[in-house]
Amino acid sequence: MSHWIDFLEKNAHVYDDKVAIIDQETNRRLTYAELNREVDQWAAVLSHHGVSKDDPIAFLNTTNCLLHVTLMLACSKIGAFFVPLNFRLSNPEIENVVKALGPKLYVGVGEKVLNVDVPYLDTKQVNLNEYTSYPENKSTLDDTILMLYTSGSTGVPKGVMFHGNMLLTNQIETCKGWGLTPDDITLVETPFFHTGGYNVLLLPLLYLGGTAILAQSFNPDNVFNCIEKEKVSVYFGVPTMFQMLLEKPRFNECDFSSIRFFVSGGAACSIPMIEEYQKKGLMFKQGFGLTEVGPNCFLLDEKDAIKKAGSIGRPMPHSRVRVINKEGKDVAANEAGELLLAGPHVCVGYYKNPKAFEETFKDNYFYTGDLVRFDNDGFFYVVGRIKDMYISGGENVYPGEVEKQITTHPKISEAVVVSVPNEKWGEVGFAFLKTDGENLSSETLREYLNPLLSRYKHPQHVYCMKEFPLLPNGKVDRKELKKKALELV
């Protein structure tokens, strides 16, 4: 396989009239043959508008539509690379990204909304039947095929370049590691400007010959409907989404018989939530990854979900892992250190920003900025982000470790700990709690934590909330909670 897109052309012959994509927005069902044909047509459209080898194509739309898939695949047929833009940003923010990117073409659905000096293609004005041929120049496994922007800790967007080998490695290893089959059906709700949209289940299943349903956004009722009507067998979400499903009355009535397993990422699932799902025979596989290294670098199998609760599992076969201390030395078991990853799943760089990449990619390893530890059985646990760690009375406190113990409380479904200034200790913890409606005091929480954590790790402040602010990818917005904590103290 010398060209990444070869998998689609192979499946167009092998699976022919099998449904590949179901687009909820348009209610279209495309077989593999139809998908490949439509991808060819869009490749012809892009080529007609001057797009060729190594050209970036920017796409902006406010939903997870079929065009995200067909245009991305079409780009790889002509050697260009696809850049889905984050529609949750303000227009000026998106315009700054586009200006820095310098795309050959800016593609959208309907009237042009960005004030940028870039040729614009309105897909609503395109008649695909008028475009039948193009000069084929497929992306190789070494070419950039997809680019996703990540802001990281600096807040400055960085374009992460995904080459063919990175995408293919993720597709193959995810299928093998999770035991996916061509009969699997998934529902995709994660925004396509995040790696989870393409790389957790969509591209692996299209590689394998499975079926993907594209939803415009996360909606609990739609999840239940798809599971019952479309017989979804594997479904990806973050713990917050699974908790929201659990809290719906329909959870107890839904027919989950088609589900083989759920996939959760972004944070560890709490034991109470896992146990509630297990009562209905529903199991979780949990994983961990980053935009720069792909989303599927670790796997916690369902059989270990309770025994190793809080763990991200063991490294997938394609991931080479190190955990180092501040001096750059490998740590022993049960010691916290920075997670380093290497392998064919690591990105090739940040677009037009080699300096930033050099700061994070050293000695053939990507420095993730995540603090982890591993136990004597080789299971890894995220302790927190280096930037989230705080020092209280001269001692390091890792929010992830504290959050894990807090959520063992039977009345707390979710917890986020941030630091706030303190005259005596320098910094102390501020815990935001998602409870069953009961307001827990800081004294009550500290009393509960006494046998579980050293006292210097106990949050000094507690605030109960019904819902946490969320980022577009479903993860908790820690920056917003940090801001609120500073206001409250």
Image (tube, rainbow, N blue to C red):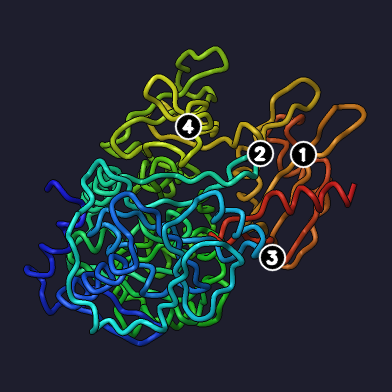
The residue carrying mark 2 is: 399
* Residue at image point 81% right, 53% down: 484
Q: Give the residue furthest to the right.
A: 423
Residue type (three-letter) at the residue carrying disc 2: Pro
Query: In 3D space, how far apart are the residues under numbered discs 3 and 2 (Cα atoms)?
Result: 19 Å
* Residue at image point 33% right, 46% down: 144
The one nearer the camera, 483 or 83, is 83
* Mark earlier in primary sequence (1, 4): 4
| Front disc: 1 or 4 | 4
- Residue 488: image location, x then y, percent: 88, 51
* Residue at image point 24% right, 58% down: 78
Q: Give the residue furthest to the left.
A: 14
- Residue 240: image location, x then y, percent: 56, 61
Residue type (three-letter) at the residue carrying disc 3: Glu
Q: Is residue 314 left or right of residue 356?
A: left
The residue carrying mark 3 is: 467
The residue carrying mark 1 is: 419
Query: In 3D space, how far apart are the residues under numbered discs 3 and 4 (Cα atoms)?
Result: 39 Å
Q: Is residue 4 left or right of residue 160?
A: left
Q: Are marks 1 and 4 in contact (CB under 8 Å)?
A: no
* Mark earlier in primary sequence (1, 3): 1
SS of the residue under disc 3 = loop
